[in-house]
Amino acid sequence: EAKNQENSAVCFYTTQLESQYARNMEIEAHVNHALEAAQFDVQFQPLVSSGNPGATHIEALMRWRSPELGDIPPSEFIPIIENSPTINEITHIVVRECGRLLKSPGVFNLGYTRLALNVCVSQISSAAFCDQLLAWLKDFGIAADNICLELTEGHLMKNVAQCGAQLQRLRSLGIHIALDDVGIGYSSFAHLLELPLDYLKLNRILIDHIDKKPRNQALAVGIVEMAHRLGIKVVAVGIEREEEFRTARQLGCDYLQGYYIAAPMQIGEISRYAKDRPRSDLQLKNETV
Ligand code: C2E
């Protein structure tokens, strides 16, 4: 009986792996055509400042709408292509769209001071990619100070030294650096010591119902305290409810991002959003800072 159960677990696992592998192959096979067919698009999500209405950011997020495969989230397709040259073409599109947004009338006059874009550790570890990125920023007329690069911790462990050297170089040119998904998973205090970081973004899992979870609060407040002592600002991601918004602010998070504030939106919408909300209006209803 036990043996049978074990066998069926193995079969299930193998079947799952096989279908996952088939899906990955399918995605990989479609990516280049999707680039040619301009199926990739960028959406933008605002971050609001918790204390100082003067400083607000916008994060650029890649979207892929495939007529054959449907909508494929970046969390699914980025890991499949992150070690291929295609990932640089994706970043090129993101930088191009950031340049377009910066040129939208009024967006940056109204207090949206920084555009955050995601890059893979495999990209940032390469001096050639960093040169390319700087050239793109120049081509699209984007000042280094307007950009924040967001790195996810997952693959940092293997590449801390290489990545750190390139990040130092980019930061010395004025680019800001954020570490994403902190607090759950691969976090390592070594990253805080070795990398030139401006922002830590707390993982969404930590923020989920944080108002009802004293242990999550304790962890978040510890990270905030540590980050602040190191001169690093903290962003709470995935704020979906007012109670999460209030709690994250009370715990000292400097910036807040999530559906409760605004979902990611198209370039036209975010331009309107920015124009309709001069920065002092960005605080939420019923809130006094
Ligand atoms: P991230 O940098 O942590 O981005 C935030 C993710 O949380 C986005 O998912 C956003 O849509 C989602 N989100 C924002 N507010 C809420 C909320 O209140 N609730 C929930 N449940 N989700 C919320 P998205 O767009 O699916 O992106 C997932 C991840 O894919 C990003 O995580 C980022 O790491 C990566 N990514 C996105 N675009 C790019 C890109 O152009 N290049 C690279 N390398 N990675 C990218």
Image (spheres, rainbow, N blue to C red):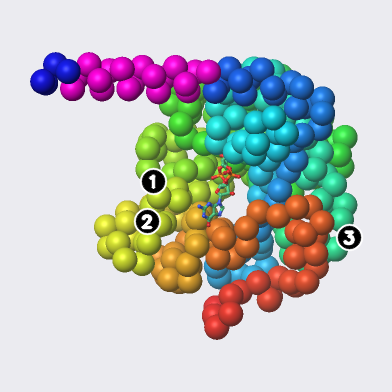
Q: Secondary structure at mark 1?
A: loop
For image coordinates 40% across by 23% down, the residue present is 16
Task: For the residues labelled 2 and 1, say whether their Cβ atoms are less than 8 Å apart.
Answer: yes
Could you give the CA–CA distance between mark 2 and mark 1, rounded to whole angstroms?
8 Å
Q: Secondary structure at mark 2?
A: helix
Q: Position of residue 182 (x, y in %)?
A: 44, 44
Disc 1 packing (10 Å; few <14; some 14–19; many ≥20): many
| Residue type, label 1 | Gly
Q: Main secondary structure of the magenta part?
A: helix
| Residue type, label 2 | Ala
Disc 3 packing (10 Å; few <14; some 14–19; many ≥20): few
| Residue 220: mark in rendering | 2
Question: Taking 176 as reference, is 222 above or below it?
Answer: below
For image coordinates 32% across by 22% down, the residue present is 12
For image coordinates 18% across by 22% down, the residue present is 5
Question: Taking 49 as reference, is 181 above or below it?
Answer: above
Range shown magenta: 5-22
Residue 177 sits in quarter: top right
| Residue 105: mark in rendering | 3
Would you say residue 12 sits in the magenta stretch?
yes
Residue that mark 1 sits on: 183
